[in-house]
Image (cartoon, rainbow, N blue to C red):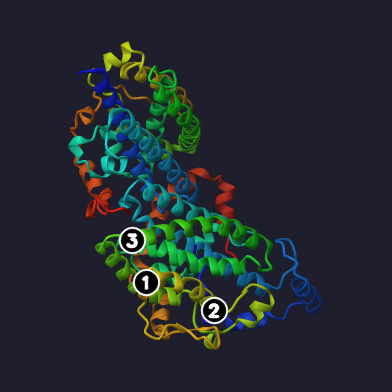
Amino acid sequence: MYGGGYIFDEPNRKQQREEQLHDDPVKLAAFEARIARGEKIEPGDWMPAEYRRQLIRLIEQHAHSEIIGALPEGTWITRAPGFKRKLALIAKVQDEVGHGQLLYNAAETLGKSREAMINDLLSGKSKYSNVFNYPAKTWADVTVIGFLIDAAAIVNQVANSKGSYGPYCRALERICYEESFHLKQGHDAFIELATGTPAQKEMLQDALNRWWQPIMHFFGPPDKTSSHSEKLMQWKVKMASNDDMRNQFLDAYVPKIWELGLTLPDPLLRKNPDTGKWEYSDPDWDLFFEVIKGNGPCNKERLDVRKWAEEHGRWIRKALMRPEEMERSALPVA
Amino acid sequence: MQIQQALQELITKMADDELVIGHRNSEWTGLGPVMEEDIAFSSMAQDKIGHALALYRLLEEHFGGTDPDQFAFLRNAADFRCCHFVEMPIGSYEFSLMRHFLFDHAETVRYQALALSKFAPFQHLAGKAKGELKYHTLHADAWIIQLCTAGKDSRERMQAALDNSFQLAGGIFEPGPAEELLIAEEIYPGESALYKQWLSHISPVMEKAGLVLPEMTAPVYGGRTGKHTPYLQQLLNEMGEVFRLDPEATW
């Protein structure tokens, strides 16, 4: 998993962002020409301050989404029914944490330490994908996450892997490779319920009904309301618009859901034969922003778990580090 | 007791140990003190559960046992033969790390012995498990030594974890019923021999780490005859929660 399309930005940074756009015009032109030629930007290369800031924001939130995303599924490892599902789920969640590690490493090449990123996650300053602020209530939820949320994340990550920042692209290539296995196991578990006993089907339909809105939220607000996209797309930080990614997802997966005899809780959902685009009811975007603010059903629970892990692990991290590393990691990051 | 039955008891207790400690290790997923440890415990959990599955399959194939899923997910605590040590909740990281260290060295000496077993399926299984365990014990040894040599606070924590774990670890070597039959047939060397080898494996690491090895005065027995802590039934209730909704269904 798990990068969503929406990357949270603090509103009060707008002023600073505009100031940072006054980079050396010659260097900026050379930088933009490189990107236009399809070259990758590497850690030691010159880059506009705003490019660096946006990438840190993007990769960091993606990394947080991986480790927080491990939690809703992780709680089902101990309850997974049978050896096959138990082993697959442990391996899958382990991969997600590994993706977090890869992504923190990629973000560190831009100058922010893992510890500083984790601190920002715990303080609420830095966000993660909203979708993980919903509870996984039954085993069917795990299959919906493993199939559809992973599928949605792949749409996003495949797009981002063609971006301009070398370390992020390389991390994403590896991540996408592993994700394709996750998708298979998610799909397999999903089909097992969809073609199972009446109770299993009912459990799956219920989970699908509850997860549909968070899935529609996953790619972020509609393009018409989304800000700061143009520059990011020119710099190949953002590679596809929210609506385009959502459409791509619906196109690939709604037919698969319907084929299994399941329904989706949106009477307006249909593919317009004239435009080739999907039409759907607008999900509740006010709710989306409320959840980002921290008012979703599981925001507190998720961060509390991470805080527990950080707190209980403190003496261990201390014992692992040399004193000079401790000092370095405590330095504030620009 | 017949030799077949003694062999089944041996396989069952080994498998149950592996399943339960694998389950416990998997509980660290998402909670590790550093991401690398999170990943390590998840990875070892898969190996342990994989060993359990392979052993349950031996029961199914050679002794007319039931399907591994049914056998693992539907039995109650009294029918399990794991030791108390693996049943204990994950507790603090230092406890889980110490358990991993003590258990994995015990598992290593066991599989080393089984590689020479006259029961051929053990040889095959041991070959695979030994390769994995090499990395598990490398991991455990490195962490024990690193934490114990990083200062007073962490060494004291690790010593306390060892003191709290040691008698429980002794329970791994609770003699099995009629194991003398298996020893006579050279199927395995018996718990007492394994215990001695285990001590010779862990002692050099303990010494390097500056840990004081306690005396084994009261090893915690009972698990091998179906007497367990309340933690085991809780764990099994959780493990079977979904599976038991409909044991005939496929999941």
Residue type beneath disc 2 = Asn
Q: Quadrant of residue A233 in the image?
A: bottom right
Specify which label sits upstream in the sequence, 1 or 2: 1
Residue A215 placement (x, y as % from top left)? 43, 73
Front-lying residue, A273 or A239: A273
Question: Looking at the image, can residue B176 be seen?
Answer: no
The residue under label 1 is: A211
Residue type beneath disc 3 = Leu
Q: Secondary structure at mark 2?
A: helix
Q: CA distance from mark 1 to mark 3?
A: 16 Å
Mark 1 — on which chain does it sit? A
Q: CA distance from mark 1 to mark 2?
A: 19 Å
Q: Can marks 1 and 3 be said to lie on one chain?
A: yes
Q: Crowding near pointer 1: few (<14 within 10 Å), some, many (20+)?
A: many
Mark 2 — on which chain does it sit? A
Residue B148 placement (x, y as % from top left)? 45, 35
As drawn, A67 above or below B3? below
Q: Quadrant of residue B103 in the image?
A: top left
Q: Can marks 1 and 2 be said to lie on one chain?
A: yes
CB under 8 Å between discs 3 and 2: no
As drawn, B88 above or below B219? below
The residue under label 3 is: A193
Q: Nearer the viewer, mark 1 or mark 3?
A: 3
As drawn, A161 above or below A22? above
Q: CA distance from mark 3 to mark 2?
A: 30 Å
Q: Is residue A65 left or right of residue B3?
A: right
Q: Secondary structure at mark 3?
A: helix
CB under 8 Å between discs 1 and 3: no
Question: Looking at the image, can residue A197 be seen?
Answer: yes
Residue that sits furthest to the top in the current view: B184
Residue A91 placement (x, y as % from top left)? 45, 49
